[in-house]
Amino acid sequence: MISGRGSNMIALADAVEQERIPGAEIALVMSDQPGAAGLLRAAERGLKVLVIERGDRTREEHEQEIVAALVEGQIDLVCLAGYMRLLSGYFIDAYRGRILNIHPSLLPAFPGLAAQRQALEHGAKWSGCTVHFVDETLDGGPIIAQSIVPVWEEDTEETLSERILEQEHLLYPKAVAQIVRGEYEVLGRRVLNSQ
Ligand code: GRF
């Protein structure tokens, strides 16, 4: 599920194509934004795309339509990749433990919007990215995998974001492969590699 550029979605599609996520298939690329650049990139690659706009509906009405489409498409795992909406309990219940997200910081530091800017402004010396399960909290679900990158003194929001994004493209496919292979166990907040 995307709302914008879709570079993480493409990284996942590449990984599937190159059999780095054995057994996986990108069944659907869904966006709430008809203008999302990633939709075009997905369609160019022959992936099935679907736009479900919220319009003036409530969050739950919007999500009911999305969940119905996911169920109909027999989707097993939902990967949020720059999807810019919070999911309600309704969605999370329908796909509990089967929704992943990638966030451009070392959670629990800097949840929410503009995480790279938050890290810079806070003066962090290291940042990175996190793949986590999605629960009702904002970027707060159990952590599956993280990568770290240095923050340089000359960094701007753009240069730091680029450095983190490179790691995102490596980390997300690896984390999805671990989940798809079922090589994990969730103990409270801890996601253990069970391999
Ligand atoms: C990424 O930085 C991701 O961590 C965050 O939103 C951005 C999406 O980028 N959740 P893209 O659309 O995958 O290029």
Image: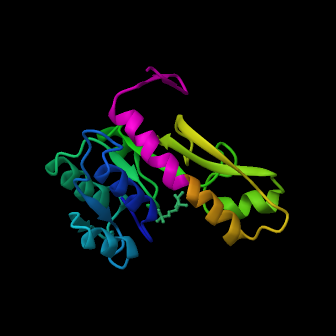
Residue 126 vs 180, above or below: the answer is below
Between residue 106 and residue 21, name the one nearer to us: 21
Pinpoint residue 54: horizontal percent, then vertical percent: 33, 68
Between residue 106 and residue 169, name the one nearer to us: 169
Please say whether residue 55 is visible from this viewpoint: no
Please say whether residue 48 is visible from this viewpoint: yes
Pinpoint residue 61: horizontal percent, then vertical percent: 28, 59
Q: Residue furthest left?
A: 72
Total residue callouts: 0
Pinpoint residue 125: horizontal percent, then vertical percent: 81, 52
Which stretch is magenta?
A: 168-195
Picture quarter with the N terminus: bottom left
Between residue 52 and residue 22, name the one nearer to us: 22
Residue 63's quadrant in the figure? bottom left
Q: Residue furthest front?
A: 18
* Residue located at (35% from left, 56% from top): 14
Residue 8 relative to residue 48: left or right: right
Q: Residue furthest bottom?
A: 35
Residue 193: say if magenta. yes
* Residue located at (39% from left, 76% from top): 37
* Residue located at (60% from left, 55% from top): 104
* Residue located at (36% from left, 44% from top): 20
Pinpoint residue 144: horizontal percent, then vertical percent: 51, 35
Residue 50: say if magenta. no
Between residue 15 and residue 27, name the one nearer to us: 15
